[in-house]
Amino acid sequence: MKVTKIETLVVPMQMDKPIGSALGQLTGFGCILVTVHTDEGISGENLIFTLNNRRTKVLVQMVEDLTDVIVGFDAGHIAAFWARAWTSINFLGHQGVSVVGISAIDGALWDALGKARNMPIYRMLGGAKSRIPAYHSGGLWLDRSIEALVDEALGFKQAGWKAMKMRLGLADPREDIARVRAVRDAIGPDIRLMADANQGKTESEAIRLGRMLEEFNLTWFEEPLPAWDLAGLARVAQALDTPIASGETEYTRYGFRRMLELRSADILMPDLQRVGGVSEFVRVAHMAESHDVPVSSHLFPETSLQVLGGLSNSIFLEYMPWFSPLYNESLEFENGDAIVPERPGWGFTFNRERAQNRAR
C-alpha cells in the first residue's frame, strides 16, 4: 500500500461568540483537513488547525512540502516516514511548524493503516483501555461572570459530566479564588475540577495563587507559567501540593524528556498536533510511564481518544467540541467516560459535504 497523494482542505470555522482566556480572545479557527491517498483506494484522514485562522497557509505549505518524504513510499511504514521527515526538517528545526507538518501526515497514516487492517488505532497500539475518563473543557472561560460560571458548571453536572475545567488569569488572584470557590460550591466535592492559567503567571504569582487554590482540591493546576520556563515550572510544582499539568505546547520526545528530567509537571499533556502525531505521543507516554508520570490529552478528542486507549498511564481525555461538527460520527460517553470506538483507524471520518460547504 503506497502513498499516491497528500490532499489538504482549509475549512474556516467561526465560534458562535468569542471566548476569553489569559492568551487572548478566540473567535474561530483555520482547520486543515489532511488526507493521505494510497494506491489501494484506502485513505487516511487527520486534522490540524490555527487559532483565529491566522498563519493557516503556513501550515498548509508545510504539509504539502513534506510530500517528497511520503509519496511513493509504503503507507504502513510509519516509523520510516517519521525518520525521513525528521531528517528532512533538520535545517528548519525540530519544533514549531515543521513538527506540526509531520504530525498531520503521521496521524493520517495511522488512520489509513487501521482501515487497511480493519482495526482501531488503540488496538494496534496494544489496547490498554476501552474507555477513558473525560472532562468538559468547552466552557467556564475567563470572560464569564461568576453567575455565568455557576450556571454553566451546574449545566455540565446535570448533563452527567464528572469532571470539568475552568480558566484562571485575572490580575487580582482574589478574583480567581472567588470564581473557583463559586464553582466548587456549586458542583460539590465529588466532581473533579481542573484550573488552567494558560501560561499567564510569573513564578511567584503562580506559587502564591497555587497555595490559595489548595483548599479546593483541584485535580490539577494547568500551565501556570509560559511554556518555555521549564525550570520555573519545576519550582512551582515542588512548592505546591496540587498537581501541575503541562506540556500542550511542548514538541517531541526531547522537550518532554527535559520536562521529566526537571520534574516540571506531575501530569504530561501532549498535543497531537505539536508533539509529532500518534507515533511521538506514544513515545512520550511510554517515557513518562517509566517515570511513573501519567498523561492526559490536549484538544482533538476524536483522535486523542484512540491514542489514550492504547496507553496504560492515560488518565483523562480533554473534551473540547470545537471540531466535532466536521465529523460524521459522534463521541459516545457513559457515566463520565468516553468510549473508545471499535471502528477502524480513528473511528471518526470527515463529513466532506459539510466541510466543503464551510470551505466556500
Image: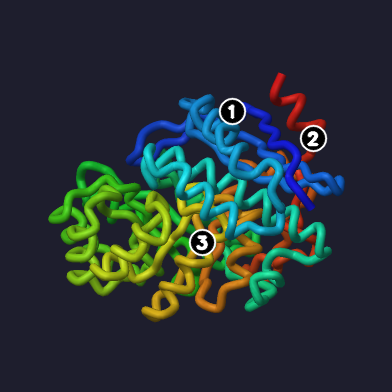
Task: Report if residue 17 is visible in the image.
Answer: no
Q: Label 3: which residue?
A: 281
Please give the label number shown on residue 352: 2
Between label 1 and label 2, give the one nearer the viewer: 2
Which residue is at the front of the view, 2 or 351? 2
Between label 1 and label 3, give the one nearer the viewer: 3
Q: Residue furthest top?
A: 360
Please give the label number shown on residue 30: none
Residue 242 in the image: state x and y as whole percent.
30, 70
Residue 330 in the image: state x and y as whole percent.
75, 52
User: In what element is the residue under mark 2?
Assistant: helix
Circle 2: residue type: Arg
Sequence order check: which comes first, mark 2 or mark 3? 3
Give the residue at x 53% y 41%: 101
Residue 73 in the image: state x and y as whole percent.
69, 48
Between label 2 and label 3, give the one nearer the viewer: 3
Residue 10 in the image: state x and y as whole percent.
64, 28
Sequence order check: which comes first, mark 1 or mark 3? 1
Cα–Cα gap, marks 1 and 3 = 29 Å
Circle 3: residue type: Phe
Which residue is at the front of the view, 139 or 133? 133
Cα–Cα gap, marks 1 and 2 = 18 Å
Which quadrant of the rendered structure holds the C terminus?
top right
Q: Label 1: which residue?
A: 14
Relative to 47, 163 lies left or right: left
